[in-house]
Structures are given as C-alpha cells and as structure tokens.
Amino acid sequence: MTRVGVNGYGTIGKRVADAVAAQPDMMLRGVAKRSPNHEAESAVRRGHDLYAADPERIDEFERVGVPIAGTLPDLLDDIDVVVDCCPAGVGARNRERYASHDVRAVFQGGETPDVADASFTARTSFEQARDVDSVRVVSCNTTGLARLLAPLNETYGVEKARVTLVRRGGDPAQTDRGPINDIVPDPATLPSHHGPDVRTVLPGVDVDTAALKAPVTAMHTHSVNVTLDGTPTADGVRELLEQESRLFLVPEAAGIDGAGALKEYALDCGRPRGDLWENCLWTESISVSGTDLYLFQNVHQEADVVPENVDAIRAMMTDTPAEESITRTNDALGVGLGSRLGEQLTPNGPVTADD
Ligand SMILES: NC(=O)c1ccc[n+]([C@@H]2O[C@H](COP(=O)([O-])OP(=O)(O)OC[C@H]3O[C@@H](n4cnc5c(N)ncnc54)[C@H](OP(=O)(O)O)[C@@H]3O)[C@@H](O)[C@H]2O)c1
C-alpha cells in the first residue's frame, strides 16, 4: 500500500483525495489546508483526516470547531508521497519541505516544469516517472492535448498541430475570476505557453497554440487542426481515437450540444461532482481534408488531471506497467463509463447509470 497525503484541498486537491481513497493499492492518510473554511469542514465530513498546513493557524480550526489530526509536518512524517495541490507557485515553495521529510512529490500544472524531475501524463510519460523523486502532472489543457496528439502521432505522424483554446474564465466557485462579458485573448501574444508545455510530455511533436478566455465556467473548448504526415480518413481517425480509454467521442445521437449538456450528462450518469475525466470529442466534428485533420474537443478543467495524478503516484512508487496502472485507475474511478454508454445510445434508447 502506498501511503499518500494531499497538501492543498481545493478544486484539484479534493478530487485527487477522493480518487486516491478509491484505489485498492493506495491509502489516503490525510489532507492539509491552511484555512478552516467549508472545504475543511467537508473534508472531515467525507472521512478524511485533516491537517493544518500552517501550524500557526491551528487556533483558527479549533475556534470554528473543525477537528484536525495534526499539522502538515505530522502528515509528511506518515506518508510515502505527497500530492501538492496548492495554488500555482506555492508548490515550488513547498518542494524543499517535502524533500526534508524524505517524501516524494507530485506537483500540478500551475508550477513551472523545473519544479520536478519529470513532467507527466500517463499516456505519454509513464516510464519517465520511474524512480524519480518528483513529477509534475501537466495542466488540464496540456493533458487534453497530449492525450489527443499521442495516438495521432504514433499512427500517422504529426507534422504540425495548431490549436485555439477557448478557456473557461474560472472554475464555478471562483467568483473573483472573469471576464464576465467579453472574450479576451490570454495571452494576446502567440503562441501561448500551452504548446511548449505539450512538448514537455510529447517532445517530438510540433504544436502551436493560441488561447482566449471566455465568460464560462464549465469546460475548456479546443479547436484543433493537425497536419499529419500520413493521409487519414475521418473514419480511420474516429476508430483510432475510440480505442483510447480517456477519450470520449460524444455520439451525435446523444443530442449533447455543448459543455452544459455534457456536465448534465455526467451528473445524470452519477459522476461525482459531475466530473468528466475524459476528453470529450465532438464526433461529427472529426473531418479530414488531404492531410489536415480538424476537430473540436472539450476538456473538464477540474477533472481530467485527476486520474493522471493517481497514475503518477503508481509510476513513481511501484513497478506497475503503464497499461495496468491506467486500467486500475480507470476501473476504480469509473473512467470510460461515458464511452460505454455512448456506444449504446440511440435516439430512442434510454440511458441508465447501471448500463
Ligand atoms: N482548477 C483547475 O482548473 C486546474 C486544472 C488543472 C491544474 N490545476 C492546477 O492545480 C493546482 C491547484 O489548483 P486549484 O484550482 O485546485 O486551486 P484552488 O482551488 O485555489 O485550491 C488550492 C487549495 O490550496 C489551499 N492552500 C493555499 N495555500 C496553501 C498552502 N500554503 N498550503 C496548503 N494549502 C494551501 C487553498 O485553500 P486555503 O488557503 O483556504 O487552505 C485551497 O484549498 C494549481 O497548480 C493549478 O494550476 C488547476
């Protein structure tokens, strides 16, 4: 059993904690955060041992009646690996502390690549994470692009990928984010950092990205154009991508027309927090002109990196083969449920969570 702690219990941390707790070969020993707010209370309510990340703020937890099991150093003394889910930049400041407690660390995509020994997605970089002390799970957008481009590159060869990312302005709970009535180039300079970030996990792939921020919270949308070395057919690309367990090809018959309906579908299927761990590709958008492939995909920013964090732990801490780890993670979480339902969807066919 790998003993795991999660430091930073927000959007990503709470999901990673639940995903780790669901793995039969991992033990969640506790979660840490700074403030005794509603997320602290719900961590305790969900049965997680809660630790005060800042020992000087223990009094605040006691004052509002949120029970704590100790402080972050206590948690670090009790685990093999920590998943740092603190806000971007805080992870880098925590790095020395983790090393001093002799625990390995998984960082998130808000950190720069030099925070860790290797950057990670399970599909592209499992072996690079073997026996290192730290990995960085790349960001939600980068994870979504790497999952898509890896099989295309292996089968056809990617000559050049060009992607426009319409990013959600903030997560649903981030009331301080925006824009609220605009679409903002972010950054206005090209290319955006996402393309170089993809190359940290897919070094040979040439990808340029341009990014905008839109007044939505549900998901990111990617408009993808890939010039391939080979000449594909749209059917061939569809069949190739359908074999990827973390790609969900949204069937036309589902009548799902956007991120709102996707989230509703996830909730109706019983997904925790309405999470979509898979990239959601619009099947009817997959089009080919010569060697150019076009498609749209949506990425649930709060969720797609979650199974990747679980696999990153297994890659670093065990000798489990990549495919076996991915399958174990998928089975424990229910990743792929959407695609199985998708295959069975017909315009007249009901969908049930038991299918
Ligand atoms: N949200 C996304 O869409 C998304 C997607 C992929 C990757 N990421 C990356 O994942 C990381 C976490 O992002 P997030 O969206 O989950 O952030 P978040 O929702 O703001 O959560 C961060 C958590 O860390 C706590 N925290 C802050 N400072 C801390 C410290 N010094 N020690 C311990 N806990 C601390 C925060 O609450 P308290 O201060 O109240 O304790 C909060 O619980 C970032 O690197 C981000 O770039 C985010």
Image (spheres, rainbow, N blue to C red):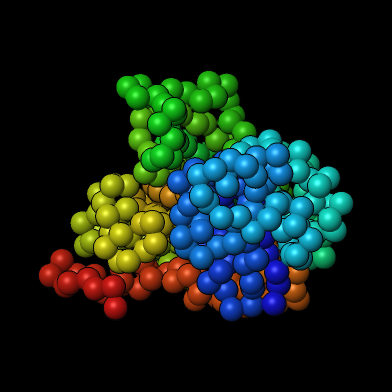
Q: Position of residue 203 (x, y in %)?
A: 71, 49
Residue at the far front: name it: 63
Q: Position of residue 263 (x, y in %)?
A: 32, 53
Q: Is residue 300 left or right of residue 78?
A: left
Which of 109/10 is in front? Answer: 10
Residue at the image point whose x is 32% and y is 22% from the top:
181
Q: Is residue 26 visible?
A: yes
Residue at the image point whose x is 69% and y is 77% from the top:
1
Name which quarter of the figure residue 275 lies in. Answer: bottom left
Which of 249/118 is in front? Answer: 118
Q: Position of residue 350 (x, y in %)?
A: 17, 72
Image position of 11 with respect to 1: above or below: above
Residue at the image point whose x is 72% and y is 58% from the top:
75
Q: Is residue 234 left or right of residue 262?
A: right
Residue at the far left: name it: 348
Image position of 212 with respect to 144: above or below: above
Q: Position of residue 139 (x, y in %)?
A: 59, 45
Q: Is residue 229 visible?
A: no
Q: Is residue 280 left or right of residue 341?
A: right
Image position of 175 with respect to 282: above or below: above
Name which quarter of the figure residue 88 lies in. Answer: top right
Q: Is residue 350 left or right of residue 207?
A: left
How many marks do you count on the picture?
Answer: 0
Name which quarter of the figure residue 354 lies in. Answer: bottom left
Which of 36/242 is in front? Answer: 36
Residue at the image point whose x is 55% and y is 35% from the top:
209
Q: The C terminus lies in which quarter of the figure?
A: bottom left
